[in-house]
Structure formats: structure tokens, C-alpha cells
Image: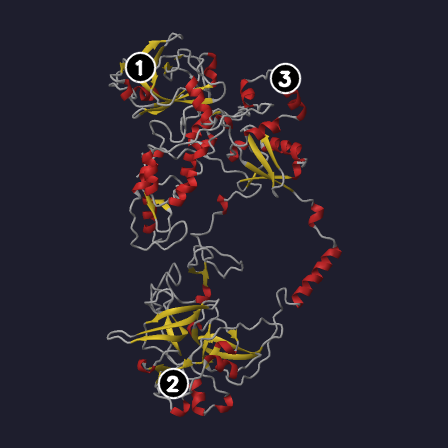
Amino acid sequence: MYVKVRTVDGKTNVTVTISKITSVREFKDVVEQKFGIKREKQRLFYRGKQLEDEYKMFDYDIKLNDVIQVMVKPDPETLSLPSATTAETAGLMTADKSSGGGVPESKEKLSCSSKYYKVGDLVDVRKISSGAWFEGKIVGIVKRDECGSETVKWPTLPGRACSGNLEAVNADGKIPDSEVIKNTDNRNMIENTEDGGILYQVVFEENEGDPAVEVNFEHVRPRARHKYNFCDLKINDVVMANYNFDNPQGRGYWYDVRITAINKRRRDNEIIGCLYAGRDAVLLENCKIIFCDDILKIEKPISIADRSSEYDKLMQMETPLRQIALNCPGCHDNPHIRCRECSCYVCGGKDDPALQILCDECNTAYHIRCLDPPLEDIPDSDEWYCPDCKNDENEIVKAGEKLKESKKKAKLQSKNAKCTRDWGKGMACVGRTKECTLVQRNHYGPVPGVEVGTSWLYRVQVSESGVHRPHVAGIHGRESDGAYSIVLSGGYEDDVDNGDEFLYTGSGGRDLSGNKRTADQSSNQTLTRLNKALALNCNAKLNSKGAKAKNWKDGKPVRVVRNYKLKKYSKYAPDVGNRYDGIYKVVEYYPERGKSGFIVWRYRLRRDDDSPAPWTAEGKRFIKLHGLDKTEVPDGYLEAKEEKLEPEEQESKEQKTKPKKRLHEALKQPSSPVKRPKIVEFKLDRSLKKLIEQDVNTKLWDSCSQYLKDGKQTYIAKVAETFMCICCQELVHKPVTTICKHNFCKNCLQRSFAASVYTCPCCRCDLGRKCNMAVNESLSAILHQLFPGYEDGRQ
């Protein structure tokens, strides 16, 4: 097999032929020859794992055409910088810090006084992250640093402040009219009372234990204490109201709202307005305010010189906290209720918040004393994970550590120290790189998209196409069901091939111990397992002495593949690789003493396919017209062959008239250009065209129709790619076409809705909870015609 070796930067890419049991040490020698990198300086990576010298390629599950990355270890001298360079770097870092580029040293800020506020005043503070106002208390007033961050400007709402009758919130009743501040335009209020160069250190009353935050004058104002009567509100008034943009029917946070409409109703009044919310100050329009009894007045700051003694007391008078959205719906923010959602996940207690630690993965809180084992102090590390989220370090294989061998691999014969047998560098031991999901494993009949006459170079490709899934076995079937496909490869001397009809020998009767692939006949075959499976395809009752079909065409179909090894026994075998020859039916089966002297089971199969046989003149013309005369090779195969041949060897090989192997001759490109026949265009029948015209996926079918000129195989592949479900990555089954013109399996869409995801999995278009998941019957009928049998086994 062959793999690709690529440098980390992706600039150099080389294909290398290796064996499955090539050691990493040997592979590094090959890399040294190809790249010129010494073995001790190489670091090889595959799927995030570093390849170690003591292991083999098989231990890392390296497959055909996989990519292995190579990285060059740096020299130790380049890792340590000279003293001069270190000094220069240190100087640059110092300069960066002094200029504000690095982490600034903490400086004690100078206290000062404000023209409008005192320490201890109760105010409303706007959080820049949400744009909402919260109750706070001024605990300090300092000067802003000259090199500090720029002031965050917040957009203002155009409008006027309401001047209607007010109701005081505090317990002392109404404030005298002389103390009621008439509000003005919000923009003018900021401009006329500017107190620049000062920062206010404020603590939020809802979280008194949190450190103080510094805000400028624009984001602080006197505590809102007065409620408006609903009848006094007018359009264009700017007020303070409660709104929740995540759940408009529930309690939220307090924002400045400009009233755009007032709806007076018999039961519940309603206010509609616009507000700014979020860190980016997004303007939200047509917001419905449902808590019309909690509309507060926006207070205007008064200079300290103009304050009265009553107003000074008012500014420092406690008020009940306003209702806001619940932080925890489980306990409704009740401090006396134990809750595992917002507090310690183990005990549910809300005490000692300073001794609680949060998991950086699930964001769950734990008391350090409740952990098992308990912690004495809060860890100093930047990241901490709870026992449920933390990965077991013993399960992680780090670079340079040994692999964890599975029990399955430990029992393999290749793991035996006495076994020195090489598996070879061929394709017999490679695994599948892809699997056919278009039809089920127990699918009878043709595989959609695979035409009669299609050829593959290796058996593993036949397995990937779904025509014959086993890599080695000649019969694919189940003892309780039947046989789905067989391969004629000349492995049994009793086989007789006459093209449209042949005698096939059953399996078994050979000693394959010691991991052998084939051996001479050493015992009688029995009508069990795969032999029984092939007998079940015959249109007759199962008989231990053999049976003949009453009507052989009514039997179960069997896909037949002929291998090039059959060429020395039959003229109907292909010259290269493996060729799909169509559908055959079992006519009869019976036991007979074979050439080896042991009893073998023989099966007579007869061709029953509408497509012409590949060995006939009509079949050869069909193969050329559909572009099937070129043998399919694995990805990267030709590049691997070119890399394997040295320039001198390649030149001498081109001079030879007769190559050693027929396989290489067939793959060799002709020296003179040969005009290839034009591929016949795939024509849709009338019923299929009518269904496509009825389907709503017009644009998708128009894009697929451009591939009709490239033949049936190309068109079928394009349709399968276009109508693949993005959820299950398979052809849509019971397709549902959404309003955004995307197609999904009905079951996949139902599972998405069951997970409370009501948007399109492809474009996130809102489908609504009551989305009509009607099956697109036109699309379903089209896919059934193009891919017959693909829905078998799918629910």
C-alpha cells in the first residue's frame, strides 16, 4: 500500500509505498531518503499522534492514501537566545509596558471630588455589557488616568421626559414639589451636566461582595424613585421600564425606553417603545412593555451646591431592590433555599461563596470542602475542571508515550514475537477507505449507479462500491437469508465458465489454519453457512441432496464479478482487475465428487440481466459509449507508481516492448493520442421528466441536468450528492422539503425537533414548532426510480 508524507507547512508532498507492518524506524529511513531529513530530527504525526520508533504502521491504523505529517526538530542552539538578544528583548518588553502595550503596573489613583455626587450616594449604574440600569452605591471618586481607556459613548434616545404626576417609591411618601426635578431631553441632560475627567467607583447592590467597578459620568445618575401614572404617559416620552428581549412575557432588566405607542385596554394596558440593548447598543424597536405599573422617572443630577438637606438625605436613603429577571429559575433567587443549579452542586448550600470554585467546562459551582477529595485552598491554576469534566490523564497518550494496545490486536498472530512474516506492500491487506451507504449490506439486485461492465483494479474497490463487500471471500451472503453477490476468480478447479451460464463451486473443505488465504481441498463440503446461503437463492425448497428451480427467473438475484485471475481458465474473464458482469440466477445446485476426490457443492447460474454482456460486441460498444473502458484505480495510485519507479528504471521500462505484467500494460497510457468515443448522453424517460417538473426543487434539478451529457454514472453521482441529507449524510429517505428549499429525511428532522431545535439544520431558517413535515412525494418517486432499493432497511 502507499501513503502520503507531507511537511507541516504543506509545501512538499511525497507518496511512499510501504507495508502494513513497516516499523516507524524503517519508515523514517524512507523519509530521510525522500526529504533529506535525518532520522533523529524527524517527528512524524498521524491523526494527532506522534509515531514512535518501537511501533509499526499497523499499530496506528494507518490506511491507504492516508497523510503522515513530518516536522523537523529545531536545533538546541536556536532555542537559547544570546545574552544581548535577551537584553534587547527585555528592553522592548519594558518599553511596551510603559507605552501601554503590556500589562500596566498597578498605580494608586488619586481621590477627588465631584460636582454632582458624593461618596455614599445611591445611584443607578448602566452596565455596558447589556445597556441595562442597576442599583448601585458610590464608594469612591477618582481621577481618570491620561493614558487610560477611552470613554465609552452610549447613544441617546431622542424624545422628551414625562412631566406628569409622580408617586414616590420610598416609605416617606411624596416628595415636596420643590424637590421634584423636572426632566429635560436626555441628550441635553448629559451635555449640560458634563463632569469629565472623573471616574466613579460603584458597587452593585445585588452583588455587594463583588469589587467596585469604575464608570464615567454618562453611565451614572440618581436612583429612580418615582413611578408614573399610566394615564400621564405620552408618546415620545423617555422613561425607565422593565423589558426582557429573550422572553418578552417575563421580567427582565431596566432600560431607557422611548414610547412610540400606548394601547389602553380593559384588562391589561400595553406600551410599545424602542430601546438600546447589548454591548453594541443595538436599537430594538416595537418592544412591548407589559409591566405598565412599573414605569419609573429618569432622575436628573443636581449639583452639590444646589442640593437641599432633604435631597442629601434622599440620595443616601435605601430603597427596595427593583424586580429583575431571575438568575436561577430553580430556586427563584431565594437565599434560604438550597439549590444545586446556582450554588454548590454537591450540597446546594449558598454559604461561603468565596470558597466556591467554578468548573471551566460545565460552569458548575462546588465548595472546595465538598469535593472528593476536598481541597484546602482555591487552586492557583487558571483552569479547573470538576470530576465529571476532567479527562483522566492516564487515558491520554502523550507524545513519546507507549500506545495502549487493544485486546483484539494483542491476540493477532502478527503480534507474536516469533512471527517475522511480512505482509507485503500490495493491496491485499489494506482496509476500506469508504463504504457504500446507498444500499444496505443485504441488498439484492444491482447497486444504483454501477453499470454492467464497470471495472476496478483491486478487490477492495469492489467492496467500497457495494457490489461485493467481502475483501477475500468469494460468496457474500447470510445463512438465514441468501447470497447477494459472488466473485469468479478461478480459485476452484471444478468451476466451468460459459459466459451466460457457469458452474460455480461452493466454499469450505479447505484447511486455512495459520492465516492462509487458500489451500488444496482436504475434506468434503457441507450445505451450511455460505453454501446454504447461495442455495436459498434458488427458486426451490431447500434440500440437503440438491434441488432444481421450478422457474429459475423467479429466484433471488446474485451480482456476479469476474476477476482477471480467471483468464487462464476462461475467455470471458477481464484482462485487468475485477469486472461487474450483471445479475445471475441460480438454476440448480447439487453435491458432486470433484477433481480432488472430495464432495463439493456445485451451483449452476444463468444470466438474467437487461444490459448486454461485456464480452459481446454489443456489450463492448455499451462499455465504450458509457465511458467504462477505463479501469478505476484507488486515489493516489498512479502517483504512487510514478514515485516508485526511479527515472532510469522508468526510462528502461518504456523501451521494453513487452512488459512483465499484464496489469501494468493495461494501465500504461498510450504514447500516441487515441481519440476516445463520445460518451452517450443519459436521457430521462417521460415519466421521470414529468416528476421532475412537478418537484419544487427546480434549481437543484437544473444544476443536475447539466451532467446528463456526461453519462448515467456521472448524473446519478451528482443527484446523490445534491440530495444528501446534511444530518445523516445519506440519500434522503422520505424527503421533507422545507420552506427554505432544503431537503432532509423525515426522521432526521423529527429528531431535530425532538431536541427542541426548530430551525433548518442547513441555513438556520426558523421553521416554527408546528412545521408541516409532509413527505415530498414527487422527489421520493424520482429517487426510487433512480436508486431502486435504496430505501430497504431504512425506517
Q: Against 460, is 490 above or below?
A: above
Q: Amino acid at mark 3?
A: Lys
Query: Looking at the image, do the residues carrying marks 3 and 1 touch, with CB atoms under 8 Å apart?
Result: no
Residue at 54% across / 18% down in the picture? 662
Q: Position of residue 34 (x, y in %)?
A: 65, 33
Q: Quadrant of the C terminus?
A: top left
Residue that mark 3 sits on: 656
Q: Against 333, is 34 above or below?
A: above
Q: Amino acid at mark 1?
A: Tyr
In front here: 216 or 317?
A: 216
In three-dimensional space, the C-alpha distance between marks 2 and 3, rounded to whole angstroms, equals 104 Å
Residue that mark 2 sits on: 163
Q: Amino acid at mark 2?
A: Ser
Residue at 42% across / 11% down in the picture? 493
Q: Secondary structure at mark 3?
A: loop
Mark sitting earlier along the chain (2/3) = 2
Q: Secondary structure at mark 2?
A: loop
Residue at 33% across / 51% down in the picture? 753
In-image side of 600 versus 576 (left or right): left
In front here: 636 or 334?
A: 636
Query: Mark 1, mark 2: which one is toward the viewer?
Result: 2
- Circle 3 packing at 10 Å, graded few (<14), some (14-19), many (20+), is few
Mark sitting earlier along the chain (3/1) = 1
Q: Position of residue 53 (x, y in %)?
A: 59, 35
Q: Position of residue 33 (x, y in %)?
A: 66, 32
Residue that mark 1 sits on: 589
In three-dimensional space, the C-alpha distance between marks 1 and 2, rounded to whole angstroms, equals 102 Å
- Circle 1 packing at 10 Å, graded few (<14), some (14-19), many (20+), is many
Q: Position of residue 340 (x, y in %)?
A: 37, 61
